[in-house]
Amino acid sequence: MDILIFRYGLPGLPVSLVLYILFTSVDIDFGSDFLGVPIVISLALILGYYIHQIWFLHFEKSSKSYAHKDRKVLDEIKDKIKDDDKYKMFFYDGDPYHIWDTMLYSDLIPKGIRDKDRGMWHSYHANYSNAIGLMFGAFASLAYLIVQLVIVRNQQFGSLESILLICFIFFSIFSYYLSKKAEITRYLVEGLEVYWVKLYFKQYISELVKQDEKFT
């Protein structure tokens, strides 16, 4: 339940909040209606799910992806294996991401390191998907504000417009903050991954050599 709420609910909350404001401005009793809050929560979860999927689709297709050739830890592994036939004999496909992933989940790497790596990447994805959700919320509040000022109220600024303006400013600023926080998290985790390769790669190869000798 916690994963459902925090992974999908939070990214969808800003747009759902704007929709809640829209619904209550149309029907003043919507907020007190028995189904009002469950409807908004359901919208937050549904929208959050799709926002999360949008982020991951972009992530996998972009230079940010795990397997992208310019990722720092993969550069480090390429440098380790490019001039050493002993390393190459164990990695027939030579795919640095496959090598890194296999090494990270080997028995040699302490579980605490795997948990830290997984936790930091989870934080990175959560911050970015929440930033995208806030960005969508900012666009939704701005669009609603423009409609209110230009079409409905004929450029009269009232309490509803003030709320929408505050939402737009807050969502925009917080979206920028979370995106920067995500980039800092990625910078830190990539630095740690390079350090872990430097620390454990030779031991990992030694273990592979020992295992190979057992079967020859």
Image: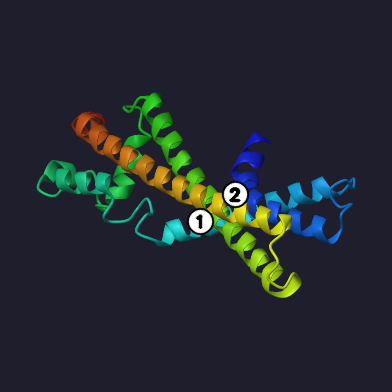
Q: Nearer the viewer, residue 27 or 111?
A: 27
Q: Which numbered mark, 2 or 1, is in the foreground of this view?
A: 2
Residue 182 screen position, x and y as percent? 42, 45
Question: Quick check: marks 2 and 1 in contact, CB under 8 Å?
Answer: yes
Asked which quadrant contains residue 19, the reply is bottom right
Residue at label 2? 11
Is residue 197 rendered to the left or right of residue 176? left
Specify the amino acid type for callout 2.
Pro
Residue type at tag 1: Trp
N-term-proximal mark, 2 vs 1: 2
Q: Is residue 200 above or below residue 136?
A: above
Specify the label residue 55 is tagged with.
1
Badge 2: few (under 14), some or many (20 or more) residues near its Cα, within 10 Å?
A: many
**CA separation in Å, label 2 and label 1:** 11 Å
| Residue 39 screen position, x and y as percent | 80, 51
- Name the side, left or right, on which 140 lies relative to 194: right
Residue 81 to residue 28: above or below? above
The residue tagged with tag 2: helix, strand or loop? helix
Q: Residue at x 12, y 46 (%)?
A: 85
Residue 89 visible somewhere in the drawing: no
Residue at position x 58%, y 56% in the image: 168
Q: Position of residue 7 (x, y in %)?
A: 59, 43
Q: Residue furthest front?
A: 156
Which residue is at a point 26% across and 44% down the rendered structure image? 73
Q: Nearer the viewer, residue 213 or 61?
A: 61
Q: Is residue 133 left or right of residue 177?
A: right
Image quadrant where one finds the N terminus: top right
Q: Residue at x 18, y 32 (%)?
A: 202
Which class describes the residues within 10 Å of circle 1: few (<14), some (14-19), or many (20+)?
some
Question: Horizontal and vertical percent for residue 80?
Answer: 16, 43
